[in-house]
Amino acid sequence: MNIAIVSGKGGSGKTTIAVNLFSYLKDVRLIDADTEAPNDHLYLPGEDATDTVNKEIPIIDQTLCTKCHACADFCAFNAIVPTKTKMLVFDDLCHDCRGCHLVCQEGAISYKNHPIGTIMTRNIDGKPFLSGTLSIGEQSGNKIISTMKETKSTTKHTIIDGPPGVSCKTVETLDGVDYVILVMEDGLFGLHDADMVVELLNELKIPFGVVLNKAYDHVHVGQNYIQENLLNLLVRIPYDETYQNLSSKGKLLTGEISYQRILDTIIKGVGII
Amino acid sequence: MIHELAILSGKGGTGKTTLALSLIPFIEDLVIADCDVDAPDIHLVLANQTINTIPFYGIQKPFINDNLCTKCGLCAMHCNYGAISDDIIIDLKKCEGCTVCNIVCPVHAISMVDTVIGDLYEKETPYGPMIDARLIPGEEASGKLVAEVRRISREAAKKANKNHILIDGSPGVGCNVMSTITGVNQAILVTEPSESGFHDLKRIIQLAKMVSVDVLVVVNKYNNSIQYTQIIEEYCNNEGIEVALKIPYDKAIFHSINNLESPSLSTHPFFQSDEWKQFLTKIQVVNI
């Protein structure tokens, strides 16, 4: 079973659910797909093996180039800009579509690898953990996410910790998953941003359940939203200083009896066997 | 000259929007730009009226004319995003709009169509014009939508003769954030005292340095961990970056948001403190 954890609003508690669920389950692997702010590794120390992820960017042979700028006209991402003397390539804007060489009549365009980030692999108590990191200055970690997901796995389950928001990186995270755990922070912002995720999940037709996190006793906005929209509430986690303190130090919560019950409830609700 | 101030964080949920809402009443001559296009939240709290809604065409997407298509498979073979299946069905959510399928199709069965990726809104608030946007969930090219919010807010500033633009950004360091931070005069980086908050702060500092933007750091909920606050202060000190404000954790701040009030306008004592007043003097858009 492939399970993605997403939230809409940042800081809702995706990482905490992901690392603890991973530690608590057997026969599972974890993928940290929040490549712009990957934090799972802070909770799961171990020996690293690191691979580089590349995109292919064009190199233009200036001796063959006739400066017709067909490539610049073609590039939908403005990564090739014609100047009087040569075609300039902006590496960070290139989306790796490999189209520019198709329009070049002179055969002046070839490609070279350009690193966009890394995939770190750790073995945590015999369970595989992959963490993707987008290099600073790069635009998109989508290829890092898809590369991690394509990695072969012998485990029964995969948990994918996703990015906040509902942009293309979330779509990449959700591609091919069987179930989504939507972590919704209680409060006005948390539920508004989760609502955008609900719209996306309904469109993609992926089954999901909601974890209402940092739930406040007297503020019922989150609970009301879930009831009004007939969403499947997996579990309600109250705001808890002990959890907050341990998590902020990069510690797991699996030693807390009360948190084990929360994890059991999630596992049952999701139907992880 | 128009002066742009961006609020960013690296890690999500550290309090960017709460800080933006707290600053807004103190900035004269203001245009607000909410660049967190896939989780725009300022409009939820700040009273506003939409003057104009503008659909944003950020991308061209392919459509196949089934009468012409011979299912030869060339488009699927060339698509580097896996957006075209073997039976030539396009998954528009995966498409990045590169137009490769269009140029390789031997029978010209594919046309590229301008596609709306979100709506922009021109709004009026008690503190001046506000521009925000809502990405259609799952759409591509969110960085372009951010750039458009900034462009229209600069236009609005010129039109209304305003000199300051306050930008609320999204978490992360990717295309949305690069679109938000590039070319601003100053950025406030909001962090929280935790392992994750510190880790992600270092990444956004690195990005700010790369694009040569001056930064101030704000540690939110600092009393949740004095230890991590000190680690962050030491790090910033070594990097030559000022920690300009430390905001205590207080449920009252959270409640004021849920009551649709700017935290700094409530009776909360922190926003009457010398620390807050001193912080305002360091923000280049505040008229003192």
Image: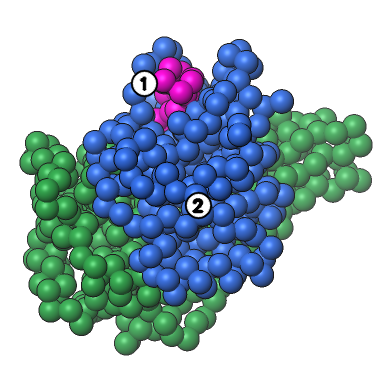
Chain colours: A green, B blue
Residue at the image point whose x is 60% and y is 52% from the top? B216
Query: Which subunit holds the residue at mark 2?
Result: B
Between residue B256 and residue A118, name the one nearer to us.
B256
Give the quarter of the figure containing the N terminus of chain B.
top right
**For numbered disc 1, what is the local secondary structure?**
loop
Q: Position of residue B134 (x, y in %)?
A: 40, 30
Vertical placement of A190 versus B235: above or below?
Answer: above
Mark 2 → mark 1, Cα distance in angstroms: 30 Å
What crowding class fits label 1: few (fewer than 14 Cα within 10 Å), some (14-19), or many (20 or more)? some
Q: Which amino acid does label 2 sit on?
A: Glu
The quadrant of the image that shows the C terminus of chain B is top right
Amino acid at circle 1: Asn
Judge whether residue B108 can be spotted in this image. no
| Residue at the image position 61 percent from the left and 65 percent from the top | B236
- Residue A146's place in the image compared with B129, above or below, is below
**Badge 2: few (under 14), some or many (20 or more) residues near its Cα, within 10 Å?**
some
Q: Nearer the N terminus, badge 2 or badge 1?
A: 1
Magenta span contains residue B125: yes
Q: Does any portion of residue A64 appear in the rendered image?
A: yes
Mark 2 lies on residue: B275
Residue at position x 55%, y 42% from top? B280
- Front residue of B91/B72: it is B91
Residue A37, position as x, y percentages in the image: 47, 60
Q: Which of marks 2 and 1 is in front?
A: 2
Can you give x and y, in whole percent of width and height, for residue B111 in the image?
51, 23
Circle count: 2
Q: What stretch is highlighted in magenta?
A: B119-135
According to the picture, the residue beneath numbered tag 1 turns out to be B48
In the rendered structure, the answer to whether residue A232 lies left or right of residue A214 reads left
When asked about the image quadrant of residue B99, the answer is top right
Q: Are marks 2 and 1 in contact (CB under 8 Å)?
A: no
